[in-house]
Amino acid sequence: MSTQTNDQAREKAKVRRSLLKLERRTAPMLPRPLFYRRAALSAGIGFGLLALALFAGMLGYRLTEHLSWLDSFVNAAMILGGMGPVATMETSAGKLFAGCYALFSGLAFISIVGVILVRPPGLSPVSPRGRFRRRKRLKGGLPVKIFRVAALLFLTGPIAAPLLRADEVILKDGTRLEGKVTIEMESKIVLNQGGNALRVIPREQVDSWHKCPWPVRTAGDDIAPSAPEPVTPAATATKPEVEFWPPRRGERYPNLTLYDHRGQLVSLASLRGKVILLEPVGMTCEACQSLSGAGKVGCFGHQPAQAGVDALEDYFPRYTGGLSISDPRIAYVQVLLYGLDLHAPSPADAKAWAHHFKFDERPNVYVLAGTPELIGPASFAMIPGFQLIDQNFVLRAWWHGETGTGDDLWTKLLPMVPQLLEETQR
């Protein structure tokens, strides 16, 4: 009885070894049931590694770019599958993580597929006669080495990201700003957010700032939170000014002081107290032409318009519960970022655009001529699109039509307009 038990134990151990370790080319062939079990085990391990790699990417995007779990899944899956990211990386840590994750994914996906399809090295798939047939074995553990290199690249990203990411300034209202702290004074901090975007932050508004990787507390933490930082009124401005760019959802919108279609300098912050529907416009954009009313008055500058798209004023009541875009509580602002020559437009271009689409006949519509400072990849990605700014001058929602990212225009952004108006009444 003891001998039979030992034989069964040895047989089970032999089966476990056959499932976990591939036999040599000269070893006896594996029975078909065990082969199927090992194939299922390999598939389980492979899909488990795939799920782990996908979750690691989702977690990285969640921590570095503060994306939603769904957006993190889309970006991680697209990179892991070799298609490339969907969202634009805005932080240094996010860019570093995305690069390392892309290098990892390019090698790991192939290696994981190799794990899923693993089979006895001396055997090929079942032949038409129902038997295994011999094949030559590839020498060397190349898939294992590739996977180790890919894993090493993936692990260096999270380790190096905290050391190379940008400085982070945390305001007392909870807003987080990233960039490079270039000037630190007792009264203010100057944060460079990339390019020419410099933001001056009064010290009393700062809760703490992190000059990575170590946090630095600021003096005067016992000072009560102050009012939002002041903005330059249009009356005191003598030339177009851009406070910083691009805007970020949940933060105060950058104050843009630009020439409007009437030839006057208009400060966007002077519209505080109204719900602002802002549309970044490229004058050669077909959708922008259609949404401005090309279907009624014709296209501007002999540019084509997008077929099947009506004017925004026709869609607006349908998705805002009957509100009119001419409602005095609403300001409709078009910022012309690109002219017909793809350079910054002039005030004369804004005047011609407004006159063509009859915006100059509406008191609550502003057509602003952008400046060269606004031209760049961030602005290009906004077109066509819309941004919704609440009465406190905070960006509440945005939608990019080209990529379909952000808050959906029809189900989220436009229906939010009456909600913001109700918040003001309460």
Image (cartoon, helix red, strand yellow):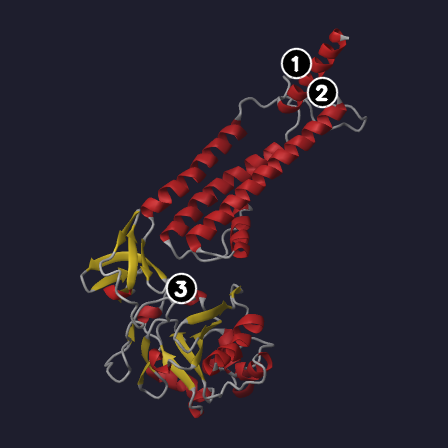
Q: Is residue 408 above or below residue 310?
A: above
Q: Is residue 36 above or below residue 377?
A: above
In the image, taking residue 303 as reference, residue 160 lies left or right, namely left
What residue sits 32% from the left and 47% below the top? 164
Q: Are marks 3 and 1 in contact (CB under 8 Å)?
A: no
In the image, taking residue 27 as reference, residue 283 lies left or right, namely left
Q: Position of residue 172 (x, y in %)?
A: 33, 63
What residue sits 37% from the left and 70% below the top? 252
Query: Dot 1: what SS?
Result: loop
- Residue at the right extreme? 129
Query: Dot 2: what SS?
Result: loop
Q: Position of residue 265 (x, y in %)?
A: 30, 83
274 vs 365, nearest the viewer: 274
Q: Position of residue 131 (x, y in %)?
A: 78, 23
Specify the amino acid type for callout 2: Leu
> Of marks 3 and 1, which one's residue comes earlier in the chain?
1
Q: Which residue matches tag 1?
A: 26
- Quadrant of the image occupied by residue 296: bottom right
Q: Which residue matches tag 3?
A: 378
Question: 10 Å neighbourhood of mark 3: few (<14), some, or many (≥20)?
Answer: some
Query: Dot 3: what SS?
Result: helix
Question: 10 Å neighbourhood of mark 2: few (<14), some, or many (≥20)?
Answer: some
What residue sits 64% from the left and 35% below the top? 44
- Distance in Å between CA atoms under marks 3 and 1: 61 Å
Specify the amino acid type for callout 3: Ala
Q: Which residue matches tag 2?
A: 30
Specify the amino acid type for callout 1: Thr
In the image, taking residue 43 as reference, residue 175 lies left or right, namely left
> Of marks 3 and 2, which one's residue comes earlier in the chain?
2
Quarter of the image for the N terminus: give it: top right
